[in-house]
Each structure stands twice: as C-alpha cells, then as structure tokens.
Image: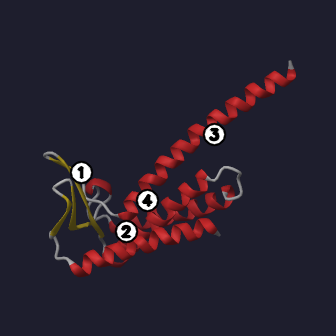
Amino acid sequence: MVYYILAFIVFLVDQGTKFLIATRMELRDEIPVIGNFFVITSHRNSGAAFGILQDQRWFFIVVTLVVVVALVWYLQKVKDTPHKLLPVALSLVLGGAIGNFLDRALTGEVVDFIQLNFGSYTFPIFNIADSAICIGVVLIILETLLEGRREKAAKVEGNEHHE
C-alpha cells in the first residue's frame, strides 16, 4: 500500500503545482527563481516529452492507460521483494504517468512550468510528473544494474561453496 500512497503523493503534488500555474499565471508568464537559470514559466504542451507528437491526444491516452495497467501489474509483482528501489521507482513513474494522463484526458494538453536555462540553451519546459517519471526511470535502470551485480556476486559465492 505504501507504494500506491507514494504514487498518490506524486500525483497530488503534480496536480497542485499545475493548478497553481494554470490559475495564477497567464500563458508564457515567467517568474525568475534562480536568475535566468531556473525560471517558472507558464507553458502548455499538447505533445510528449520535448514537444514531440503534438496533438496526438488519443494516442497518449491509450498508451498511458496501457502503461498504467502494466505498472500496477508489475508493482504488485515486485512490491514484496527485499530490495525496495524498484517498487519506489515504479511508484514514481505511476504517479507521474497518472498526473500527465489526467491533464491530457481533461484538456488535451499538459501544464508545464519548470524551465532551466544553461547559457543560451533552454532545456524543454517540464513539470513535476515529468520529473517523477524521469527519476523513476533512472532508478529502474540503477536497480537493474544493481540486480545484475547481486546476481553475479551470488553466482561467484555459489561457485566458492561448491569448490
């Protein structure tokens, strides 16, 4: 249950921040937070990450529904494992996916507002759901690498006991 609570917290923080941006700022308004490096910018995205696949609302709704079902299924499968990194990672992805799904289902676009500038380069504007998904994916990759090392160590240890 704790993993679903974590996903729900991610969802609530995501929706709360998007609500504040959508109701308190006009589109394209900017609030500098750390100089020009970190700027809160009211932006809408009808596509996926980095603005790809613009105006493909139904595609995203169907894909996200499939992903959410798969995430819940896999989370149920791994929630009792001794290593908690994977279920936490899946929870982050789940909460973020549902947050962006709700935006797309209700309005056809996602509220983005976190803008990072690196000199003259502006990273594509994103939101809390995007952040949770990215962090979750990085943690899934990390857990996969750690699991490979654990299996290798167990194999080596198993061979030492047989000698």
Q: Secondary structure at mark 3?
A: helix
**Distance from label 2 to label 4 (Cα)?**
23 Å
User: Which of pointers 1 and 2 lies earlier in the amino acid sequence?
Assistant: 2
Q: Position of residue 32 (x, y in %)?
A: 18, 63
Asked if residue 163 is positioned above or below residue 116 in the image, the reply reads above
Residue located at (51% from left, 63% from top): 94
- Taking the image as shown, residue 104 lies to the left or right of residue 154, namely left
Mark 2 neighbour density, 10 Å: few (under 14) some (14–19) many (20 or more): few
**Distance from label 4 to label 3 (Cα)?**
22 Å
The kind of residue on which mark 3 rests is Glu
Q: Secondary structure at mark 2?
A: helix
**Distance from label 3 to label 2 (Cα)?**
36 Å
User: Which of pointers 2 and 4 lies earlier in the amino acid sequence?
Assistant: 2
Q: Secondary structure at mark 4?
A: helix
Residue at numbered disc 4 = 132
Residue located at (27% from left, 54% from top): 50
Residue located at (74% from left, 32% from top): 154
**Distance from label 1 to label 2 (Cα)?**
26 Å
